Image (cartoon, grey):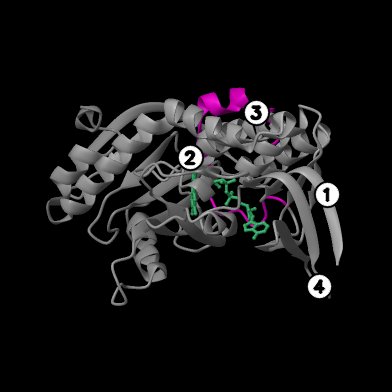
Amino acid sequence: METLKCDILVVGAGPAGASAARAAAMTGLDVLMVERRDRVGVPVQCAEFIPAPLLGEVDPAPGVVVQSVAGMRTILPSGATHLMRSPGRMIRRDLFDQALARAAEKEGARLLVSTRVLRMEGGEVVAREKGASHETRIAAGAIVGADGPHSTVGRWIGSENRHLIQAAQWRVALAAPMEVTEVYFHQDFYGGYGWLFPAGREANVGVGRKRRGASDEAIGRVLERFVLRLAEAGKVLPKPIGTTGGWIPAEPVRRMTRGHVLLAGDAAGHAHPVTGAGVSQAVIGGRMAGKWAARAVKAGDPGLVGAYEEEWRESFGEVQERAYGRRKLLEEGWDRLETAVKASWIAFRQYYA
Ligand SMILES: Cc1cc2nc3c(=O)[nH]c(=O)nc-3n(C[C@H](O)[C@H](O)[C@H](O)COP(=O)(O)OP(=O)(O)OC[C@H]3O[C@@H](n4cnc5c(N)ncnc54)[C@H](O)[C@@H]3O)c2cc1C
């Protein structure tokens, strides 16, 4: 079996992995990114909203920004609405992710696509390229697990996501352009919400909800009903141009390192536990993980990866813990949803109390 050697192995080339790889490669180390998809960022599994300041953190490639967003309108179960100013951008996530991966390659990181990391064996990582008859071993000084919500690397260190939100989304035509995103709370979307995010003449319409059990209605049907309601309100055309979905972590802060392994982005459960947004945390936290992985390898001291966890907790710990607490309020108060939303959704003052 062939063995590849590198200083730092990054599993997954999403925003967290590419940002980690870039930060580590900038220190001159040999960095290898391994991505199971054939093309980075494809298929898109995202509603494609990012807060405006994030663009200042990355090098926005041409075509990434689809439109500006001035704020977010929350629609409560009673129909009451609340508008919050929160400037953001709707982006093309495929181009965004590809630009981040290219930036890492420009710093010298290598990228292997169509290759899935399978397991850890005798201190080495085992991966297999799509269609290959043989497996490849990878020996690395440090490993960054940036492999998303169902992280294989997280399993190796006993730190997995346990609170996942299921999401489904249609791309639809928009009846008229919109300058704000819309978020809908409804009994159908337990522990989550429905969204209508404008993207020029089209929009991403989706539903995120926590699973309660086998008797749950299929999320596809919940989404279809939501789209029909939006169509009746004259906002969208009820025909999917494209469909996607996925899983979003809604986790309390938990361990993100062990030995020479670090987790970043969704693999570490770093999406916001109430909104489900995770691109910013993936980019910024991924960069931190890459920086500390590189320092640990350079110093020959795996213990240094613990400093990543400390820095992350300082930057994001409080926000994440508060959001997880608000999520619990939302779920516990679901029978009185209007009141629960006012106590637990980011648009309302009580959220920050
Ligand atoms: C429907 C939906 C809508 C969302 N909308 C928004 C939004 O509007 N705004 C926002 O900020 N966030 C949103 N999110 C969350 C956001 O997409 C994630 O937080 C973000 O993608 C996290 O980045 P990441 O790099 O950690 O993980 P990912 O983007 O999931 O990247 C992980 C990468 O690892 C690869 N991988 C996985 N396993 C392996 C393996 N074994 N071997 C090799 N490669 C592997 C995957 O192919 C993938 O490319 C949404 C999520 C969903 C599901």
Among the two numbered marks 4 and 2 on one chain, the one whose residue lies closer to the N terminus: 4
Which secondary structure class fits the magenta region best? loop
Among the two numbered marks 3 and 1 on one chain, the one whose residue lies closer to the N terminus: 1
Residue hosting label 4? 131
Q: CA distance from mark 4 to mark 3?
A: 34 Å
Tell me if residue 66 can be seen: no
Compare residues 118 and 83 and report the one nearer the observer.
118
Tell me if residue 207 can be seen: yes
Q: Amino acid at mark 1?
A: Lys
Q: CA distance from mark 2 to mark 1?
A: 51 Å
Q: Amino acid at mark 3?
A: Val
Residue 25 image point, x, y percent: 77, 33
Among the two numbered marks 4 and 1 on one chain, the one whose residue lies closer to the N terminus: 1
Give the residue drawn at x 17%, y 45%: 340
Give the residue drawn at x 61%, y 25%: 57
Of all residues, the one furthest to the right in this rendering is 2
Residue hosting label 3? 58
Residue hosting label 1? 5
In which quarter of the view is residue 313 placed?
top left
Compare residues 156 and 58 and report the one nearer the observer.
156
Which quadrant holds the C terminus? top left
- Front disc: 2 or 1: 1
Q: CA distance from mark 3 to mark 2?
A: 27 Å
Mark 2 beta carbon near ligand 1 (under 8 Å): no
Residue 175 bears which disc, if any?
none
Give the residue drawn at x 43%, y 51%: 249
